[in-house]
Image (cartoon, rainbow, N blue to C red):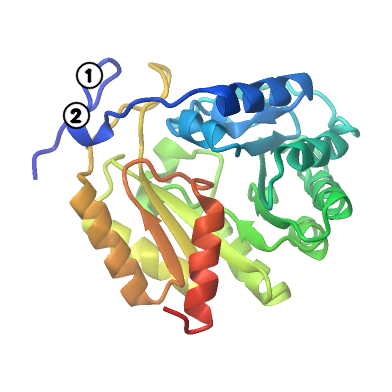
Amino acid sequence: MTQDKGRWGTAKPPWLRRRVPAGATYRHVLDLVRCSGLHTVCQEAHCPNMGECFSQGTATFLILGDRCTRNCSFCAVVHGPVEPPDPREPDRVAEAAQKMGLRYVVVTSVTRDDLPDGGASHFARTIKRLRKENPSVLVEVLVPDFQGDAEALRVVLEAGPDVLNHNVETVPRLYPRVRPQAQYRRSLELLRRAGGHRPSVRTKSGMMLGLGETPEEIEATLHDLFEAGCHMLTLGQYLQPSPAQLPVERFVPPEEFDGWRVRALGIGFSEVASGPFVRSSYRAHSLFSAAGCLEKGAP
């Protein structure tokens, strides 16, 4: 397979070219987020699926501000300085989700290593507020590693999310270059603790491909995640958000993503979303539903 070098401004392969949908629903979501004083990871991380998701009336809320205390070399979210968490933010998230008519809400955050609990209590308040606004809503949280703080993780889990998502992002060899302030084993331990503390919560993780990882490293990481108790998995193409981030080392063709999905399901994952445009929260409700069907033995 040709090792296509992806640099900022380089033409993407045909499978990565798509029309960006827009329209009344797109503008409604954009205006609602703006008027509510909220942030979305769709906007802050320059997600290629923002047009599609906003046009379908969905968004992934980004809490604890729009500036991160870490500076991962793949991520477009702005790095520090940070402000104290807004105590009204959980209310605004719940109100926006209600106005959007969401039955499945995904909430993530910047990493806040400056806070004693890493923002865990803020996550918990947001989950509880969402449940108060709509008791039947399903909630997925995509959390940082809380610097390995087991108590912070417990606080989030006790609030009762349906899905606890934490991305390993890449293979362990690439951590010093891709995630210099994170630790691969610490991320695996978070997933393991989540499943052990509250088995009813489905755990989920994700990886980006195209950063220079080898097939053998991907395979080993899939096994590590499964052994850590991870139920659901997302695999997507890394795309350089701006010239400031790492370049793409390789554009992975769709058939390879299909192959990795088959392999991951063979290892034992409940459900896997794998494709060039897949991201952590992309069509999250569909992945959750599919995983639930599989676990109940339905077709």
Q: Is residue 231 visible?
A: no
Residue closer to the observer: 219 or 13: 13
Q: Amino acid at mark 1?
A: Thr
Residue at numbered disc 1: 10
Relative to 77, residue 164 above or below: below
Check whether the beta carbons of the residues at disc 2 and disc 1 lie within 8 A of each other.
Answer: yes
Q: Is residue 280 visible?
A: yes
User: Residue 171's x, y, as percent?
Assistant: 38, 52
Q: Is residue 5 above or below residue 171?
A: above
Residue 85 spot, x, y in % from top left = 84, 32
Judged by depth in the image, the label closer to the viewer, 2 or 1, is: 1
Q: Taking 102 as reference, is 157 above or below it?
A: below
Label 2's element? loop
Crowding around mark 1 (Cα neighbors within 10 Å: few <14, some 14 to 19, many 20+) is few
Considering only order in the chain, which callout, 1 or 2, is on the residue closer to the N terminus?
2
**Residue occupying image coordinates x 65% and y 49%:** 143
Callout 1 secondary element:
loop
Q: Quadrant of the N terminus?
A: top left
Quarter of the image where one finds residue 189: bottom right
Amino acid type, callout 2: Lys
Residue 18 lies, with reference to residue 163, above or below; the image says above
From the top left corner, tell me how far across and down residue 4 is, in percent: 15, 33
Q: Quadrant of the C terminus?
A: bottom left
Q: Is residue 249 left or right of residue 75?
A: left
Q: Residue at x 82, y 46 (%)?
A: 126
Give the residue pinned by disc 2.
5
When asked about the image quadrant of residue 268, the answer is bottom left
Q: Residues within 10 Å of mark 2 (few under 14, many from 20)?
A: few
Q: Residue 50: x and y, percent?
A: 50, 30
